Image (tube, helix red, strand yellow):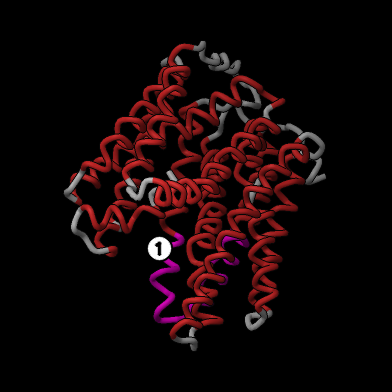
Amino acid sequence: MAVIGPTLPGLAERTSSKLNQVSILFVGLSIGYLTGSLFGGRQYDRLPGHRVAGGALLLFVVVFALTPFIPLLWLLTVLLLILGFAEGILDVGGNTMLVWLHGKRVPPYMNGLHFAFGFGAFISPIIVAQVILNFGDLSWVYWILALLALPVAVWLLRIPSPNAPPPEPAGSSRIADARLVALLATFFFLVVGAESAMGGWIFVYANQQFGGELSGSSAASFAAIAAYLTSAYWGALTLGRLLGIPISTRFKSSRILFVDLLGCLVSALIILIFPTSWVVLWIGTIGSGLFMASIFPTALNLAERRMALKGDIMRWFFVGSSLGGMVLPWIIGQLIVPIGTGTVVVGMTISLLLAIVVFYLILRFSTVSNEVDNTFLE
């Protein structure tokens, strides 16, 4: 999925569109993702999960194979809406079935899964660069990814699926409570919003904060350095997810989340306190990536300890995260021009502060209602 961004100029050229017009593709992806998350959650509770996931991955193959042939922007938007739909189904299913398969032993596996997500996003620009160097045609980016996904889709369709857990007995503390689900969905909204805001806007922040007065070759050189800063953020996030695998086997999810949230908040605050320091910006950006890395999978682990997770419940977590990834970066984008680029870090800081409040409510509420391990609060 991360390959879409680096190929946007090529897609704009093929559809005879401008870059501001081709950005509608992200709207299509987001609407498709929300729809796929809502639809897919129910299907995993009703049908063999690997068949649902394999079918979604086959949609990936078809869409990626057809994308280079589409000359019309509206038709390409529809195609990417279908791609987002398949992504939503896969995201919900991968996380849900992993919980079904491993139960209370899921933390290292969950962190491993999300490391794979991050690694894929990290290498996708490398794939684009190598295809351009060796083939000179962006079509091969999509065709190669389609060929890579096809055997995985066929494999998924052939192997047995994990079984959904049996219904919890009446009165069980693990029966999902709507208020707790809403709190968790809100938490995902806030942390994914902060993650997307940092990853999406840190280039603009660095470029305007430190390179705004430059011109010509100096401005171009600084823009390249700002791009490396963005790569450092996503690279730190990928490394943090790798480190999260052994950490998740030694510490409780609540404590890991507390340290992660505090580390993200401190990273954002030092950028706010020292806005003119280029060194502090690098430290804060890398720190944000490292501490942000394991929040999402660890929060899913925390949810598993407090309720029986099924697709119908898991889908709301991904709806919350998807909305956060759309809404918060959009709000920051609307405020950058009238207020300034400092909105990026301020917006991230506010989102993290609210996430800490919601995190406390999750622990406090589940202490009362579910009576599970809450040593963090004791």
Residue 361 shows up from this direction: no
Location of residue 370 by image quarter: top right
Q: Residues within 10 Å of mark 1 (few under 14, many from 20)?
A: few
Residue 299 shows up from this direction: yes
Total labels drawn: 1
In the rendered image, residue 283, in percent from the top left (x then y), is placed at 70, 67
Secondary structure at badge 1 equals helix
- The residue closer to the viewer here, 102 or 287, is 287
Location of residue 346 by image quarter: bottom right
- The residue closer to the viewer here, 18 or 220, is 220
Is 343 one of the magenta-colored residues?
Answer: yes
- The quadrant of the rendering that contains the N terminus is top left
Q: Amino acid at mark 1?
A: Trp
Kindly identify which residue carries mark 1.
Answer: 330
In the rendered image, residue 159, in percent from the top left (x then y), is placed at 50, 12
Left or right of residue 39, residue 12 in this image: left
In the rendered image, residue 95, in percent from the top left (x then y), is placed at 55, 31
Judged by its main secondary structure, the magenta piece is helix
Is 43 one of the magenta-colored residues?
Answer: no
